[in-house]
Amino acid sequence: MRISAIRDLLSPEFKKVENAKKAEPAKSKSPASADRTDLSSSGQRLSETKAQVSLIATQLSSQPDVRTEKINEARQKIQDGYYNTPEFVDKLADKLAQEFGAKKS
């Protein structure tokens, strides 16, 4: 999964928000007024999406690049001849037929 692709999709939305902020006239603040932020629904969705992207990026960075347990399992199956058995070949053929729509599950 490419995180940069998601960022590139969101970039125009970020620009719209920044341009809208710049276009608003500066308002004078009274000393008693408090700062307040109101986000539009699209701004809220954008904020949530950014948080989700950050979470996914963090999760992906914590995953190992190579899953050695899976590699070792596949090596053992090759050595044991598992992939040469008629049962495996039949199972593989059924899955391929389902994948290509020739057979329903």
Image (cartoon, rainbow, N blue to C red):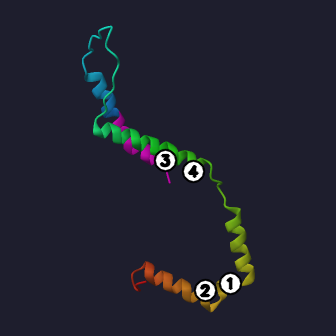
Q: Which mark is residue 82?
A: 1
Q: x, y (%) of residue 68?
A: 71, 63
| Precedes in sequence: disc 2 or disc 3 | 3
**What type is the residue that disc 4 sits on?**
Leu
In front of the other: label 4 or label 3?
4
Asked if labels 1 and 2 touch by Cβ distance under 8 angstroms, the answer is yes
Per the image, label 2 sits on a secondary structure element best described as helix
Mark 3 = which residue? 3
Whether the magenta-drawn stretch holds residue 56 is answered as no
Asked if labels 3 and 4 touch by Cβ distance under 8 angstroms, the answer is yes
Residue drawn at x 39%, y 38% as measured from the top left: 47
| Precedes in sequence: disc 3 or disc 1 | 3
Per the image, label 4 sits on a secondary structure element best described as helix
Tell me which secondary structure the magenta stretch mostly adopts.
Answer: helix
The local crowd at label 3, few if under 14, some if 14 to 19, many if 20 or more residues have their Cα within 10 Å, is: few
Quarter assignment of residue 46: top left
Residue drawn at x 29%, y 9% as measured from the top left: 30
Q: In this view, does 77 lie above or below 37?
A: below
Cα distance in 3D space between marks 2 and 3: 36 Å
Q: Which mark is residue 88?
A: 2
**What type is the residue that disc 2 sits on?**
Phe
| Precedes in sequence: disc 4 or disc 1 | 4
The local crowd at label 4, few if under 14, some if 14 to 19, many if 20 or more residues have their Cα within 10 Å, is: few
**What type is the residue that disc 3 sits on?**
Ile
| Precedes in sequence: disc 4 or disc 3 | 3
Q: Which mark is residue 60?
A: 4
Q: Magenta span covers which residues?
A: 1-14
